Amino acid sequence: MSDFVIHKGQRPAGGFARHYGAATEQVTFSPSKPTKVMLADGREGQGSCLGCGNAPCMEKHPSELALAGELEAYPGDPSLDVCPTQVITWDAASSAATVDANACIGCGLCVARCPYGAISLQAGRTAAIATGDPDGLVVAKGGQAEHPKPTRTGTLAKLNAPAAAAIPETVGSLPDAKSVLLVRNLLHEIGMNARVRRRGDTNMRIDAVGYARSNRPFVAEIELSNAVIENPRALLEDVAILHARYGYVVADIDPVSIILSLPNLRSEYYQVIRDIENVLGVRCRTVTVGAMVALLWTCSRLDGFEGDAFIIGAGGADLAANLGMHEGVLHEPYPGAFRPAK
Ligand code: SF4
Ligand code: SF4
């Protein structure tokens, strides 16, 4: 059972332990600095944990797992956990969320989701939840309210910060179910409506399905080891299933290979992708975990897989061009995140 379920009964049901007294309009992230908020009444300063009963840093709303149209029948993983390693818990003594820094992998998911700017990615390594209130923003006790939807700006951490550089090791050390949850939750936060296969479900072959913001359906194969060569071929099977069982037109489906690192240029991976496009007209896209983390950390969103987005081939394999970030921000987190590893 996940920590948020274990501790849920202690949290203020539907309300807050504390309140700013005004909605959060903007959350601003800066590398190595506490996250700041701007409130609807004009006050601004460092964010602080308000002790949400329904805590977006820990728990997804069930509507986030809903899929429109025929894909709603896809039997995905129902987990509502935000943290793939389940290291955020409720601290009853302080009525606030807390993170076990020893087990946090620094993915940034909880940081990006807190609507009150209470979480920072400390030193680009692990999440830290602020409970102090140095700028005196907390003015009210408790209360009931809907979570605001602030705009988010800035950068959680430099893209080559320690947590990003360590992604190959940290993801590699996660059990399969947790690494897939990481991928699903990253997809959600960068704007994709996604559901992933429950690990161990032998009746379902497709690893993930969903819709881009443009409402085009996608199918995805998730392979976070080096054995990525099967992904393009498996995607063909996925497209066939989505067409035959869910009624989507093949040309309207985007097949996406989600991997940890781009293989080196000699890999047959690129050739297979090219062959599939040349012979069958199916364009497989490739996205790395590092690219998704880069989008999350820079508060960027992915519209979808239109045109040449995330199309790679031998000689032209560079995801940086698809990320829409300026050069000052665009550090490759680890070899293979944006460009083929040497
Ligand atoms: S960290 Fe943010 S989302 Fe989580 S309980 Fe505190 S205020 Fe709420
Ligand atoms: S940064 Fe990621 S691993 Fe760390 S507590 Fe937040 S969601 Fe969990």
Image (cartoon, rainbow, N blue to C red):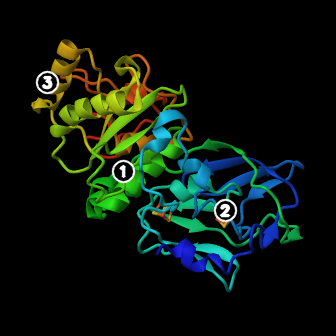
Q: Is mark 2 within 8 Å of ligand 1?
A: yes
Q: Which residue is mark 3?
A: 271
x and y, in percent, of residue 33 in the image: 60, 57
Residue at 30 percent across and 56 percent down: it is 201
Q: Disc 2 and disc 1: Cα gap in Å?
A: 32 Å
Q: Quadrant of residue 125?
A: bottom left
Q: Which residue is mark 1?
A: 197
Helix or strand or loop: what does disc 3 sit on? helix
Q: Disc 1 and disc 3: Cα gap in Å?
A: 28 Å
Would residue 109 be seen by someone viewing this image from the given angle?
yes
- N-terminal of the pair, mark 2 or mark 1, is 2
Q: Which residue is mark 2?
A: 118
* Viewer-nearest residue: 116 or 197: 197
Would residue 255 be seen by someone viewing this image from the given angle?
no
- Left or right: 40 as drawn, with respect to 7: right
In the picture shown, does residue 168 fall above or below 280? Answer: below
